[in-house]
Amino acid sequence: GVVQLLLHFPSPGWYKLQIYALPLSDPSKSLPNVYNYLIHCTKTLNPCFPFPKQYVQWKDGCYLYEPLNLCESTKLTHVKWRVLIPHAKQVAVVVDDEWTHLENKGGPVFEGTCNLNQYRGKDKKVTLNANFGEDESKYSTMLEYHIK
């Protein structure tokens, strides 16, 4: 298999890239560190923003269409979400205790919009969570964003 990484650095300097991985069939909930890279970025061409943090359940063909980031310049009044999460029964965006459920568009694709504007400037964590059906009240955190 081939792994492709897209790296964006906020400024020139030295960066450490750590890769954590498990075999697809391994049911473990924690990922061991398998590679460490030291990268020297000599210049940046465009401003960049962090991708969301991925949790261990973000695997098995999961794909994020949007949003790729929630940065200072992102319009937060109608944030569009579109994700592909195989085997998910329900998917929701969560900030504090506010849940916004995404709509299943057929198969493993979920879409929806939510207003996150009230969280701008409040340094809030936004998570994308999925339920896989074993217990309707249990959700796994898939991705994590920060609104500053």
Image: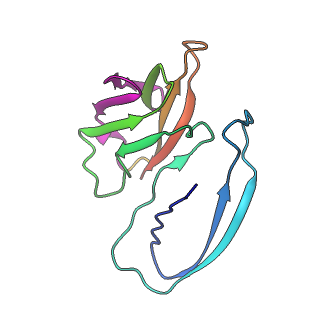
Estimate the x, y position of residue 50 in percent, counting from the top left.
45, 59
User: Per the image, is 61 magenta?
Assistant: no
Estimate the x, y position of residue 133 in percent, counting from the top left.
55, 15
- Seen in the picture, residue 34 relative to 25 is either above or below; the reply is below
User: Per the image, is 109 magenta?
Assistant: yes
**Would you identify the image quadrant in which residue 44 lies?**
bottom left
User: Residues in magenta?
Assistant: 94-120
- Seen in the picture, residue 102 relative to 115 is either above or below; the reply is above
Q: Which one is in front, 33 or 115?
A: 33
Q: Residue at x 41, y 27 (%)?
A: 108
Q: Residue at x 33, y 37 (%)?
A: 81
Q: Residue at x 24, y 40 (%)?
A: 77
Estimate the x, y position of residue 132 in percent, counting from the top left.
55, 21
- Seen in the picture, residue 15 relative to 31 is either above or below; the reply is below
Q: Which one is in front, 16 or 2?
A: 2
In this rendering, position of residue 56 left or right of residue 9: right
In this rendering, position of residue 74 left or right of residue 20: left
Estimate the x, y position of residue 3 in percent, counting from the top left.
55, 58
Q: Locate the N terminus and report the quarter of the image it occupies.
A: bottom right
